[in-house]
Image (tube, rainbow, N blue to C red):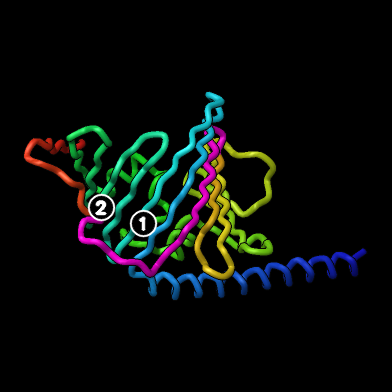
Amino acid sequence: MKKFFKIGLITILSVNFIHAIKFDTLISDLEKKDLSITKIKAQYRQFINIVDLEEIYTIESEFIYMFPDQLRLEIKEPFQQIIVVKGNNLYLKNKNENIIYSTLLDKYIKQNTNIFPLIFSKEQRYNLSEVVKKIGLKYVNEEEKYYVLSTRYAKGKVYKDKKVGLRPGEIRFIMWINKESLFPEKVSMISEKYIIDTELFGFETDFEVLEDMFVIKKNSETKIIELK
């Protein structure tokens, strides 16, 4: 019995060690990739399931990011909205309204946590390796096309156990990173109250940057309203 226990323990430790090596290598590769990116654009689709209300919403969007801190986010469905970020300043315009709303980026992120986690890190730039480390994601599996990372987070603490079900206030994150491109193509956020599945596609890092990409058009009658 002791012999089998020792063999089992050695096997578990070996598997964990292999996972640690793969994760460290992946983080190193992501850091190199992040530093090489000066511009990026992609489309994403979010499925937001409000569990209590049994309601599902779909958001269709695309974004363009320019190093170090410029972003254009265009939401196409279920409403049409343009968000432009320059530094810590954010400007928002709804289609068919001649109003531009302005606020600070960090304030907006706190109120709309589902929009920016993969686009901006705390440094306000595209930095996937930092996002992975900040959330506490760890390597858990490998599929044909993807590295699969996951973690469980509740009340300020990261959990690594395999507990069935969710703790009160717990959020589980799962991320699928394409092995070849090292871009995150799928992300799931799961809690007792909501499930958010995000698909990202059409990544480009070589394209022409037009002057008006990071400007919301306005005229003499456009109202500027500061959001509090």
Question: Residue 136's spot in the image, x, y percent?
Answer: 51, 57
Question: Residue 195's spot in the image, x, y percent?
Answer: 55, 38
Question: Residue 223's spot in the image, x, y percent?
Answer: 12, 35
What is the tally of numbered marks visible in this picture? 2
Mark pair 2, 1: CA separation = 11 Å
Q: Which residue is mark 1?
A: 120
Q: Is residue 102 above or below residue 13?
A: above
Q: In terms of depth relative to the viewer, which is nearer, 60 or 190?
A: 60
Residue that protrudes farthest toward the left in the picture: 220
Crowding near the residue tagged with mark 1, few <14, some 14–19, many ≥20 C-alpha atoms within 10 Å: some
Crowding near the residue tagged with mark 2, few <14, some 14–19, many ≥20 C-alpha atoms within 10 Å: many
Q: In terms of depth relative to the viewer, which is nearer, 220 or 91?
A: 220
Residue visible at 28% across and 46% down?
A: 83
Residue visible at 62% across and 74% down?
A: 21
State the mark number for residue 112.
none
Q: Secondary structure at mark 1?
A: loop
Q: Which residues make up the magenta segment? A: 191-213
Q: Amino acid at mark 1?
A: Phe
Left or right: 161 with respect to 213? right
Are the residues flagged by discs 2 and 1 in contact, CB closer than 8 Å? yes
Q: Amino acid at mark 2?
A: Val
Question: Residue 20's spot in the image, x, y percent?
Answer: 62, 70
Residue that protrudes farthest toward the right in the picture: 1
Q: Which residue is mark 2?
A: 85
Q: Is residue 13 above or below residue 228?
A: below
Quarter the C terminus occupies = top left
